[in-house]
Image (spheres, rainbow, N blue to C red):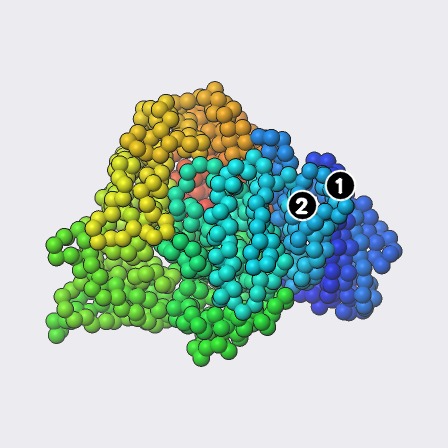
Amino acid sequence: MVVLTRAEAESRARAVRVERYGVDLDLTRGEEVFGSTTVVRFTVLEAGADTFVEVRPTLLVGAELDGRALDPGEPAEGRLPLRGLAAGEHELRVEALMPYSRLGEGMHRFTDPEDGNAYVYTMCCVTDAPLVFACFDQPDLKASFEVSVTAPEEWTVLGNGVAARTGEGGRWECAPTPPISTYLMAVAAGPFHSVRTEHAGLPFGLHVRRSLGPYLEADAAELLEITRRCFDRYHELFDEPYPFDSYDQAFVPEFNAGAMENPGLVTFRDEFIHRSAVTDTERQTRGMVIAHEMAHMWFGDLVTLRWWDDIWLNESFAEYMGYQVLSEATRFTDTWTDFAVARKSWGYDADERPSTHPVAPDPEGVPDTATALGNFDGISYAKGASALRQLVVWLGERDFLAGINDHFARHRFSNATLGDFLDSLARASKRDVRGWAACWLRTTGVDTLVPRVGESEDRRWYVDVEHVGRRPHRLAVGLYDRAPADESRLVLRERLERDVPGDGGRLTMTLDGPRPDLVLVNDLDFTYAKVRLDPVSWGSVRSALSGLPGQLSRAVVWNAARDMVRDAELGPLEYVRTAREHLPFESDDAVVQGVLAFARGQAADRFLTGEERSEALGLLSELCRDLLSSTSGAPAGTEASSGAGGGAGLRLTAARYFIDCATSPGELAEWWAAGEVPGGGPALDVELRWRLLLRLSVLGAVGVADIEVARAADAGARGEEAAARCRAALPDAGAKEAAWEAMFGPGDALSNYLFTATAQGFWQPEQAGLLAGFPARYFAEVVPLAARRGPALAEVAGRYAFPAAFVDEETLSLGEECLTRQEMVPALRRRLEDQLDDLRRALGVRTAVG
């Protein structure tokens, strides 16, 4: 793996300043390589300096410095050395043949199996720009880019600046960019289906591969409406106008991330172009990603981190602004509910693992790019966004925005650090922002808030909140009573905003009137902390959770229950029983999806075994059957979500999880034959049919021939992936061996997406006996696989191919022994450390339950 250290980057930044990149790409060289010619104009600041540029070619054709040929041989470790440079201006020209990728690194090439059309796109973050062009690859050496591309004549080319054909043929030139970092350079090319418009005097575009054209047309109005509304809202919030000349959004195949914030050309995974029915929660998630990536045009692209210790200046801000702006500017007004019940747990889980790190680590905590890659995680996204939400509550939105705008004005088209941002906040507010940052951004771990409710000597009620942790919290405490005429409903008596001191300080409140039936700490989810419920409050929500007003308040309670299960304070079967009783009356689909995901994927599959797991799956099936027959279900006094709820979405969610929880094939086979879900449920469109076929494959009710018939009916890339998933899920020794060989064999033929699909199908809790020998094979073979195929595939293999279906001491022991191997790719090591920690937790919960 190619690694740049922070010390090397600092040394190089002292030695050179980069002014301009001219990048000329030739995409007509065949299916394996493309031509890349780079001309770099840079200034040497120290006479006699030794430095290097990064380039990782298939073949280095030639290199010239100031017109003089260099003879470097093959670049060692992807570096072309430049030695003894004179002070002043220089021009470096590097010509190379570069490799196309099937793993989403550098220049990814994809051929659509549906129509044979090919598409390419770049992914240069964090270290992969040298797979596309020669460069000084670090974020603080920003430069202007002038990119030209030669492509097949029928292709469209997109870039950071507006791309235009130059004469006849397939020659394109992109408008020069303002100074940007190398990891943000972007090109996409192919015979795209495009929808174009103009807004605020700028060209806007949506682009997909041709086979997805009809689906883009169906969603284009919504996508553009969200884009325009978010764009306008950012201009209301930020003094600095949008800093680039266009705004294209390309939905590309086999994309490793959710999206990438390339200036003027945002790339998204093309699963966001829906082929089948989806819930409003899923549409909301897509909208949030659009808003998130647009925030990066300011947070990351206009003002860029100096080194990768400040990932939070990019991702935490974009995450916070994405949710907030979407809720302010679009119909999706309840985005923070989805964040609370689905996204925030990513941060909580990551923060309790040994691999946790501060939101803003000390620079020494990110010594190289390999460490940085591991920090694109739940800490930098979900926890960081939670910290910013708390900052806004504590600081006030006016001062927060004033600090942001000061930050943009001082560092536009340049680089900045945490210290720079805190300086801007300090100029905008009299509060101790540096002290706040020390507590919130430089520390690790999750605080816990434990309320105790009792009667004081003067016969008044008090709430004493024990604070296990160090951070100060500004939060709301909700006091709820049972409705006089309906014990299944809770009504809000009062909501109090209070401060919980840092360093383990307690919050004590004395209350007038009768004891509340529910005391909900962190009501409205303003802060980042695990909360507990006192026994009376837990009894109230256990019987009346579905009657608690406010979906965000219900999400806080469900999160508390989730954390109690993970901490072995609440039995996982009790969690499932609570879901069975209350989700049939839930009006918000985000809550339903979040609860069902944990109940099925963790409570049932990781924490329960034998008869208890069977009981849990049975309860979840009953729950889904109730939801399928319901149009709303919300009890009187609770409100439906204004952005992500509704009967159709709830029924679709219920159909999906009914399929996933089935333990026998009979009813599923009837659905398959009928082509619909009985009783007014959703139609079995293409994605739901594949989900149904996967579960029938797991249960042994279909075979390879059935899968191939479905594959022939869905000839595109997603059909290919779904078929691979189903084949790997078959309870057949030959099918398992074939899937294993495809993933781990020497051919290395699977793309990142086909590897993921195969791994997802392979491990099934119902097939433990059939799979008994494979955990040992995994730990023996995953290390050389990661070494051969690199960090992107290492991440996929560690995440999806890990034997998570085996929650036992033997698997834990095998994994711990594997970690002792020194040759492991860092991306794999980090993922295995996290997986094994989750395995230890699951074993602990099982022991407690037993």
* Side (left or right) of 837 relative to 599: right
- Give residue 113's position: percent from left, percent from top: 59, 30
The C terminus is located in which quarter? top left
Is 793 drawn above or below residue 291 in the view shown?
above
Q: Is residue 417 visible?
A: no
Task: Point out the residue furthest to the bottom here.
Answer: 430
- The percent coordinates of residue 175 (x first, y second) are 70, 55
> Which residue corresponds to mark 1?
169
Which label belongs to residue 99?
Answer: none
| 2 or 1: tag closer to the N-terminus | 2
Q: What residue type is disc 2 on? A: Val
- Asked whether residue 198 is in view, the answer is yes
Closer to us: 802 or 25 = 25
Instruction: Check the image and report above or below for 276 versus 427.
Output: above
The percent position of residue 410, horizontal first and vertical second, equals: 59, 73
Q: Amino acid at mark 1?
A: Gly
| Viewer-side residue, 120 vs 139 | 120
Q: Residue at x 52, y 41 (%)?
A: 216
* Residue 157 disc label: 2
Mark 2 neighbour density, 10 Å: few (under 14) some (14–19) many (20 or more):
many
- Whole-percent x, y for residue 579 in the image: 27, 45
- Residue drawn 87% across and 56% down? 67
Residue at the (51%, 45%) spot, across then down: 220
Q: Residues within 10 Å of mark 1 (few under 14, many from 20)?
A: few
Image depth: mark 2 or mark 1 in front:
1
